[in-house]
Image (cartoon, rainbow, N blue to C red):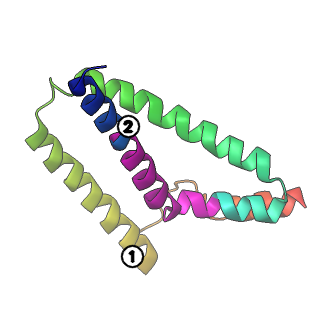
């Protein structure tokens, strides 16, 4: 094995390790992980809940990664950043307005108690 191949292999492994550690740390602070832990603890069904959450995350993330790789070079980054930040701001303001009771009832479904009802129905 050449020195260049060894360096490339080492960089790839360290990048993979860094991404795995960062993903694990940041995801543990995510509300999705808190919901999984809560549901698993309340239902007593650890393995099905964790497997279901893992499959769900894979089903959402995999197409996004594939499409991102496919279209990364054809989509300009600067306008995409503005659109993404605008959408993030819009969702934040919407959430803030709903929490303050300033939003009119738009007839949208309310899923806020769905997890609690699922746990209650399971017991």
| Quadrant in the picture for residue 55 | top right
Dot label at residue 31: none
Q: Is residue 92 left or right of residue 71?
A: right
Which residue is at the front of the view, 9 or 3? 3
Q: Could you tell me if residue 115 is visible in this image?
A: yes
Residue 88 rendering spot, x and y as whole percentages: 28, 57
Residue at the image point whose x is 16% and y is 47% from the top? 81
Quadrant where the N terminus sits is: top left
Position of 21 relative to 7 (above/below): below
Main secondary structure type of the part rendered in magenta: helix
How many other residues sit within 10 Å of disc 2, few (<14), some (14-19) or many (≥20)? few
Residue 106 versus residue 97 in the image, above or below: above
| SS label for mark 1 | loop
User: x, y (%) of residue 6?
Assistant: 29, 29
**Tag 2 residue:** 13
Is 12 displayed left or right of 107 in the figure?
left
| x and y percentages locating residue 70 in the rendered image | 28, 20
Tell me the tag on residue 102. 1
**Direction from residue 106 to residue 56 in the image, left or right:** right
Closer-to-camera residue (7/110): 7
The image shows residue 45 at horizontal and vertical percentages of 83, 53
**CA separation, marks 1 and 2?**
50 Å
Above or below, 14 relative to 99: above
Q: Are marks 1 and 2 in contact (CB under 8 Å)?
A: no
Q: Residue at x 21, y 28 (%)?
A: 72
Taking the spot 80% from the left edge, 61% from the top edge, the residue there is 119
Q: Quadrant of the C terminus?
A: bottom right
Q: Which residues are magenta?
A: 15-35
Q: Quadrant of residue 5?
A: top left
Q: Quadrant of residue 68?
A: top left
């Amino acid at each position: 094995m050449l020195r260049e191949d060894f360096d490339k292999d080492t960089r790839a492994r360290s990048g993979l390790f860094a991404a795995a550690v960062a993903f694990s740390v940041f995801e543990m602070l995510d509300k999705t992980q808190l919901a999984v832990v809560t549901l698993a603890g309340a239902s007593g069904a650890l393995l099905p809940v964790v497997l279901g959450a893992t499959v769900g995350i894979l089903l959402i993330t995999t197409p996004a990664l594939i499409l991102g790789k496919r279209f990364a070079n054809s989509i300009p980054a600067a306008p995409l950043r503005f659109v993404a930040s605008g959408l993030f701001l819009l969702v934040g303001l919407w959430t803030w307005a709903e929490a303050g009771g300033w939003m009119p009832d738009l007839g949208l479904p309310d899923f806020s108690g769905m997890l609690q009802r699922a746990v209650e129905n399971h017991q």
